[in-house]
Amino acid sequence: MEIKTRRDFLKTLGVGAVAASLPSWIYSCATGKRKPNILFIMSDDHAAHAISCYGSKINATPQLDRLASEGMRFDNCFCTNGICAPSRASILTGKYNHLNGMLDNKLEFDGKQQTLPKLLKPAGYQTAMIGKWHLKSEPTGFDYYKVLPGQGKYFDPLFQINGNWPETTEEKGYVTDIITDEAIQFMRNADSEKPFLLMCHHKAPHRPWQPDPKHWAQFKDREIPEPPTLFDDYKGKASAVKNAEMTLERHMHPLDTGGVIAPENLKGKDLVRWRYQLYMRNYLACIASIDDNIGRILDFLKTSGLEENTIVIYTSDQGFFLGDHGWFDKRFMYEESLQMPLIIRYPGVVPKGQVNEDMALNVDFAPTFLDFAGVEIPTDIQGESFRKILQGRTPKNWRQSAYYHYYEYPAWHMVDAHYGIRTKRYKLIHYYGYTDEWEFFDLQDDPQEMNNCYHSPEYQDLIKKLKIELYQLQAYYNVEKPVPMQIEKSETSLF
Ligand SMILES: [Ca+2]
């Protein structure tokens, strides 16, 4: 009689009879369902405007579109520091970089600190990290890891596997396929009585772009539409923007165009156009492999029976300039670099085919996953759980502005240190490293950020208010007053 009652109770929560025999700790109090598996798929430098459900004009990503049609797409998800290692550290810790220590790519992550996998393990989670790690120190908190050393290689990559750190083992094949194979193998072999956290981090589409030949064949003769800001002349913009060493015209390396060197007679706009085409064909061909492999993962989840109880997340550590403003690379707080694609599917919990406009940040990921797992969110985590947003209920006090802080200068591309605030409509940026200049954009009237209106009289009152809010955010996040940096040449890790 007692068992029957419990089964009836579980049925009301949507939990099947088989699950009723499982221990109580396996249920999440947040959803009343079994604690979900969390499959976190992250690519490297995949801009949202190279995903067709985000309105890409340059490629199609049918498998990511499929994921979005079955879940929720976030249109205002932002990184808090637009380069690789810092974003990864924020995702792992739920904290800004001044607290987790990864201000830039040069530093080494302190693996002793609190991280998402360490918090999930006591709740019964199996934890694994497969693919690009990029935090230099040995991964901690994972039952299993198999990571690329440094940036990794596209073909026949080396891996570092737990138990044998820092030795490397070569795997034959294409990196995006191999990482997917490994992820599927982990899920297939995982203990089905326990939930898992699997962080599946692709190297692609990081430069220098080396696509799988079968995808290159699809793109090699394709004419890629140019972005409207390809020939931004930076008029009225900050010196940091004018001085950045990331233009297609003057700073692109031959490796970024597949090792092909531009004909000598090409100059100015012709050279930019030539480089843009080769750059984008390689970049988009790398993304085609990611999309195919997302399809393989989704098919596996369906056929294995894991689909219903697995939260699938797709994101990228930050965005990228796809010729926008004449640039490649990222770092700046401009939209193309700031925005992270974010698509989340959780059958039966997240409504299908939703598009959300609320502001999410990479520091929100860890608390959100903890929340779904029914794990108490430590008070020192700075991000906020957006579980309720995923369930269709945005909290009334949800953030209306986001704080960003980029530190890495001097370094590759010589982008000055800056911080800023973005609201739904406006953006205010302060470059403070070797310069002391501001930019202000009205994103409603100027979504492409071509007109710096920092000195426009009609915006002065608004800018004053935004500065107050910006400094309040710095105080809220315990950011020490940023100081101009020592300017000296230094070595840094690639890109
Ligand atoms: Ca990156």
Image (cartoon, rainbow, N blue to C red):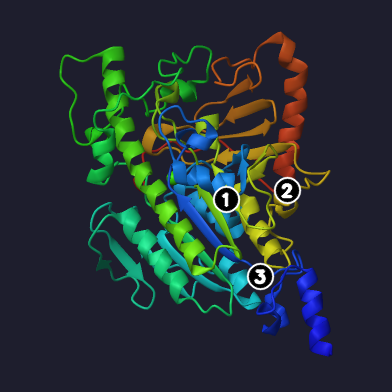
Name the spot of residue 37 as percent of width and height, x first.
58, 67
Tag on residue 201? none
Q: Which residue is mark 1?
A: 97
- Residue 430 left/right relative to 494: right
- Residue 92 left/right relative to 400: left
Q: Mark 2 to mark 1: distance in Å?
A: 25 Å
Query: In the picture, residue 192 is in which quadrant?
Result: bottom right
Q: Which of label 2 and label 1 is nearer to you? A: 2
Q: Mark 1 to mark 3: distance in Å?
A: 29 Å
Residue 482 in sight in this render? no
Residue appearing at x 80%, y 82% in the figure:
6
Query: In the picture, residue 468 is in which quadrant?
Result: top right
Q: Which residue is mark 3?
A: 35
Q: Which residue is mark 2?
A: 389
Label 1 or label 3, whichever comes before in sequence order? 3
Residue appearing at x 52%, y 79% in the figure:
191
Name the spot of residue 317 as percent of width and height, x first.
49, 47
The reply to whether dot 2 and dot 1 touch (C-beta < 8 Å) is no
Vertical placement of 293 versus 186: above or below? above
The reply to whether dot 3 and dot 2 touch (C-beta < 8 Å) is no
Vertical placement of 376 versus 66: above or below? below
Amino acid residing under circle 3: Lys
Residue 76 in sight in this render? yes
- Residue 92 left/right relative to 359: left
Looking at the picture, tell me which residue is in the foreground, 136 or 295.
295
Categorize mark 1 by other alpha carbons within 10 Å: few (<14), some (14-19), many (20+): many
Vertical placement of 491 versus 372: above or below? above
* Quadrant that contains the N terminus: bottom right
